[in-house]
Image: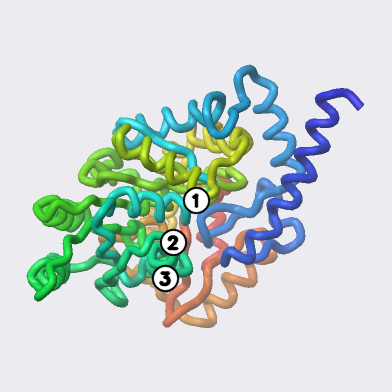
Amino acid sequence: MDRRSFLNATLAVSAAGALAPLSAQGRPTPMPGETMPTHVWLVGDAAPTDPAAYAARLARLASREKVRDTYLAQGAVTELEQAFASLLGKEDCAFFPTGTLANNVAVRVLCADHPHALVQHESHFYRDESDAAQRLAGISLVPLAAGRATPTLQEVATAFDEAEKGPFAIKVGAISLESPVRRQRGQLVPPSAVQALTDLGKAHGAGLHLDGARLLLAPPSLDLKAYVAPFTTVYVSLYKYLDAPFGAVLAGSSVHMAKAREFRHIYGGLLYQGWEAALIALDSLKTFPQRMARAHGVAQDLMKALEASGKVRRRVDPYASNIHFLEMDATLAQAATERGRAAGVRLGPFIDGALTLGVNDTINRRPVEDYVKLFL
């Protein structure tokens, strides 16, 4: 077997194995044929991966020069880090194997000698990371805004007062904000709130971390660099919608990223190679902002057409990222879901009188008229 054939065979096996964990992470389990390039997923962040097509794509990308990295240095990994540093307007950027690790390292670096952090009660960092910050770094987490995406300025000010003005003063080392907030229907923390909360944090000398795992799914009206500018560190996922098999990036100053790379090693996250994930994410990133902007445009046109029918009403949410809710009769929703199944279009769940519409790149695969017929 020649080198190219061996690479293709190896990548096919790796990609097939990478598909299995998707449903374990809460994504819808694909039905037979649903990984076809014509299939549309109006739910979730992206479509499930087709192992064979994925392997062929990775083999094609791997054929260029200077791909390999060694312990996450050089090659495609360094190229990816530079691309994200530029995209986010930060001085430096580091590749991480998982977002959980990126979040925990970021907050640990920012807290330094002050292991006390303010977080959202509904955030991934607080609810979905097995108390990693507390157990591995001894950081006390103070949860705010239970049942909501955004803490109020008063809540954060009170948390600072309770820490700093108690009988035994405690300095808050960091504030961590997730945006969009997955547990709150993908709501964004409003830019005005971001500025107010980060200004308050800076006034108290606290570091500011943004869990922006799904940030690139936000509407094109969001000024990405301006939004992340107040934060000291920013994490973005590579696998949720940029097609990578795993991985994340953490961006910030060169000083903070040097410390982050040190902790990445200490926590066991210094992979021997990460070029497979970096190559795919780099390739997707080239066109993703444009594709996502188009997807939001298609979704807006669809919702306008459905509302014009008089049978559907959109729940307006000024802070929605890529998740919308369409109020309609349950019978209509059920019929649309069944027609969607037959047509290869997966719709979101019907909850509290509304059908969930998740906007991702797959909505670009068919014209708006097709979706209107499917719903009505």
Q: Judge left or right: residue 335 versus residue 84.
A: right
User: Could you tell which of marks 3 and 2 lies nearer the N-terminus?
Assistant: 3
* Local secondary structure at mark 1: loop
Q: Are marks 1 and 2 in contact (CB under 8 Å)?
A: yes
Residue at image mark 2: 136
* Local secondary structure at mark 2: helix
* Local secondary structure at mark 3: helix
Q: Mark 1 to mark 2: distance in Å?
A: 9 Å
Q: Judge left or right: residue 356 versus residue 191.
A: right
Q: Nearer the viewer, residue 104 or 166?
A: 166
Q: Nearer the viewer, residue 147 or 368?
A: 147
Residue at image mark 3: 127
Q: Judge left or right: residue 147 versus residue 43.
A: left
How many marks overall? 3
Residue at image mark 1: 267
- Residue 17 visible somewhere in the drawing: yes
Q: Mark 3 to mark 2: distance in Å?
A: 16 Å
Mark 1 is surrounded, within 10 Å at the Cα level, by few (under 14), some (14 to 19) or many (20 or more) other residues, namely few
Q: Are marks 3 and 2 in contact (CB under 8 Å)?
A: no
